[in-house]
Amino acid sequence: MNTPILLCVYRRLDKVVAVLDSLKLIKPTHLYISANAPKNDAEKEYTDAIKKAIDKQITWECTVYKKYEDHHINSCSESIVKGIDWFFSQVEYGIILEDDCIAHPSFFEFSSILLEKHKNDESVYQISGTNINFDHDNPPKLLSTNFSFPNWGWATWRRCWAKYSHEMNNWEAIKDIINNKTNDKEFWEEFLTFNAKTKTAWDIQWNIDIWTNGGNILIPSFNTVSNIGFGYLATHTSNDENLGANLPTKNFIINNASFGHADDNQIEKKIIHLIKNISSPKK
């Protein structure tokens, strides 16, 4: 598999090993790894073990590019953004995974096809492997949606990421976009006001940038990425009973898929439920 892949890692050894094991199935030839530095001596044991695991687990023919931070970046979102910035300084397009996202092999195949097909299509901004409103019972469809979130296994182009803004400075314009693109305006305005102050997330800003630039997001009707990272060691996703935790995946053959439009009303409802319960304690 020749499409470049970025893997962002930090301190969860078991999750990183699981992701690397899944990558053995597709044997990418170009793997970019971005790693945050430990914030203390206790974490250094885990981050050092991850670096050793990376060297040990990649046994197939692969060029590995590494960006290991020398100093800890306090913000998880900033660490991810720096990794993606670095990735797109090296490649024209590619696939992005975090260290808790296990993708079905078909995700890499259809992402590679669509990345090449739409590389000059300014209207397409993202290909996503996650569909929290998945339909595994009917024939496959490739769907257009307004919502990129959650970004658990996705792909894009340098031309799109170059327009990303982490700061959310143009707040009045953002409010207008919310009114045009969402149903639960009160939730999104409250949530985005909070995130504009804290910068705890990076992917909500990315979705806003897609809306701002009139971009489309393509997702399969099947879910093809499972987030295995919900739990007590997660930065944000600590509630392992969340509806987004450990979603089932299914083989998505794009050549057999028709085209359609996602049920964005239902997707929005599920995203809001996911966000509201993402860090709730287990009952």
Image (cartoon, rainbow, N blue to C red):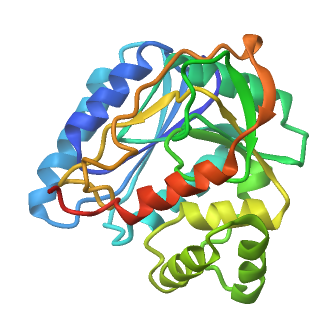
- Residue at 67%, 15% (x, y): give it: 139
The single residue placed furthest to the left in the displayed view is: 42
* Residue 228 appears in view: yes
Closer-to-camera residue (279/165): 279
Q: Residue 229 at x, y = what percent?
A: 30, 44
Residue sitting nearer the eye, 109 or 244:
244
Compared with residue 225, is residue 179 higher up or lower down, i.e. above or below?
Answer: below
Q: Left or right: where does residue 136 sit relative to residue 57? A: right
* Residue at position x 56%, y 18% in the image: 137
Q: x, y (%) of residue 267?
A: 59, 49
Q: Is residue 98 above or below residue 137?
A: below
| Quarter of the rendering containing residue 117 | top right
Along the viewing direction, whichever of 81 and 281 lies nearer the viewer: 281
Relative to 152, 278 lies left or right: left
Give left or right: position of 14 versus 63: left
Number of marks drawn? 0
Q: Position of residue 218 (x, y in %)?
A: 73, 38
Residue visible at 59% across and 40% down? Answer: 154
Residue 163 appears in the rendering: no
Is 69 left or right of 238, judged from the image as shown?
Answer: right
Q: Split into 4 quadrants, where in the image is the N terminus?
A: top right
Image vertical order of residue 249 relative to residue 217, above or below? above
Give me the residue at 44% from left, 58% from top. Answer: 273
Vertical placement of 12 versus 26: above or below? Answer: below
Q: Where is residue 74 in the image (x, y as percent from the top left)?
A: 33, 72
The image quadrant where one finds the C terminus is bottom left
